[in-house]
Image: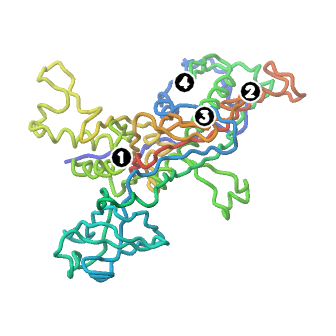
Amino acid sequence: MAGSLQLSPGVSLTPSSVKATLSSNYISTFDFLNQYLPDTYEQEFERYGNRSIASFLRNVSAEIPSASDLIKWAEQGRLHTKFTALTYGSIGTPSSGQQVFTMAGSDVCNFRVNQTVFLSSESNAESAKGIVVAVAANGTTFTVAYYDSAYNATSPFSSGTVTAFVYGSEFKKGENGMQGSLDPVDTFYEVKPVIIKDKFAVSGSDMAQIGWVEVTTENGATGYLWYVKAEHETRLRFDDYLEMMMIEHVDTEATSGAATALGTNSGSQGLFEAIETRGNVWSGGNPSTLGDFDDIVARLDKQGAIAENVLFVNREFSFDIDDMLAAQNSYGVGGTSYGLFDNDKDMALNLGFTSFRRGYDFYKSDWKYLNDATLRGGIVGGAVNGVLIPAGTMSVYDQVMGKNMKRPFLHVRYRASEAENRKLKTWITGSAGGAATSDLDAMEVNFLSERALCTLGANNFVLFKD
């Protein structure tokens, strides 16, 4: 019978820090009238291991300076054009073997006379090929003359709407050349850098207070001065905020409460919002079969077809991928050849996979942010199980540089100029700890950064939602 983890005791989510610096943070009270003294462990025990989650953007992005309040870039459009949801008129209009097609919604036809087109029904197996003989001046309709004489009086389409794309052109001898030309149309995107701040403060008296616990932090700071630990933890927490802001933040809508509090020129598009608005979203559970990944590959084929992609996933999604890949082995049920295993009794059984190839190369990596119990781990509403990020760079037109530049698909732009660098500013104020900027009997450590995340080619990303 399968067991389960008990609900109690569960994961502790009690904050390890408080807003104010108290003397109780530094030393415990001992009853020195008691002849029996406790045997104390001086060093803190790191029961949660490395608590920082700031690693994702360091691995997949670059950091590039910017000297503007607005970052804009242009992304190439499609080389070829396909129009969908076309409706059609009666066959033989305006003459035998011709048919008029009407664009859907606000679409404007860019087909030109003498271009050859392929037309396909969107509801059945009907299709036909013809040549464009007329295009309305406002681009709302175009007329096709069919190559097949069977369509002189009978339409090739019986019901539903039609998809059309150009595959070439044909002219009679001695005719003039193609009329009109097509100009490339770029799609422009923009993000705004946001200002992120934090502060740590400790009084001069507490700085002179020694503690009995030897403290340590993830970056190696050790000693018996508790404020040193507190300052370093504030710095680590701020590093995490810098990453989470780039992942989670959203644009401010003009009539929202945030617009009233911060102004309409606030907010910035983070990674998740960029993928949800411009990319691909998988929902309804993790893809756990080859058929599911075939659907993803088919979508990527229609996008940029990037050869290598990295999956940053939570633990559940990681195990689902492992189980899917293990099931492809003919000995998977018996467990004799699961992962990398050569039947050596002294070899540890590897139950995980780091990469696989299915149309494209997929590399799998655990994302600590999605597993952390105090952050994305275990939430229900708006749960994210993973994200697929293409590897490599993308060519875009940088309006600041005035030329095409190679940029990573994902990168951070921070505010900087010759006079000011706001990538990560730290300064000390007060009259303690070496500072002499005011008569405040305290040391205040200030943190500031101004940055934005640029998600280029978001159509190549996939967000996996629960």
Distance between the Cα atoms at labels 2 and 1? Answer: 58 Å
Name, please, the residue furthest toward the front: 174
* Upstream in sequence: badge 4 or badge 1: 1
How far from the left and from the top, in percent, is residue 418?
74, 27
- Please, what secondary structure does the residue beneath circle 1 have? loop
Residue 6's disc is: 1
Q: Which residue is mark 2?
A: 418
* Marks 2 & 1, CB-CB < 8 Å contact: no
State the residue in front, 236 or 98.
Answer: 98
Distance between the Cα atoms at labels 4 and 3? Answer: 11 Å
State the residue in front, 46 or 428.
Answer: 428
How far from the left and from the top, in percent, is residue 153?
21, 82
Discs 4/1, front: 4
Residue 218's disc is: 4
Distance between the Cα atoms at labels 4 and 1? Answer: 30 Å
Density class for disc 2 (Cα within 10 Å; few <14, some 14-19, many ≥20) is few
Discs 3/1, front: 3
The residue depicted at 43 percent of the width and 66 percent of the height is 109
Distance between the Cα atoms at labels 2 and 3? Answer: 28 Å
- Please, what secondary structure does the residue beneath circle 3 have? helix
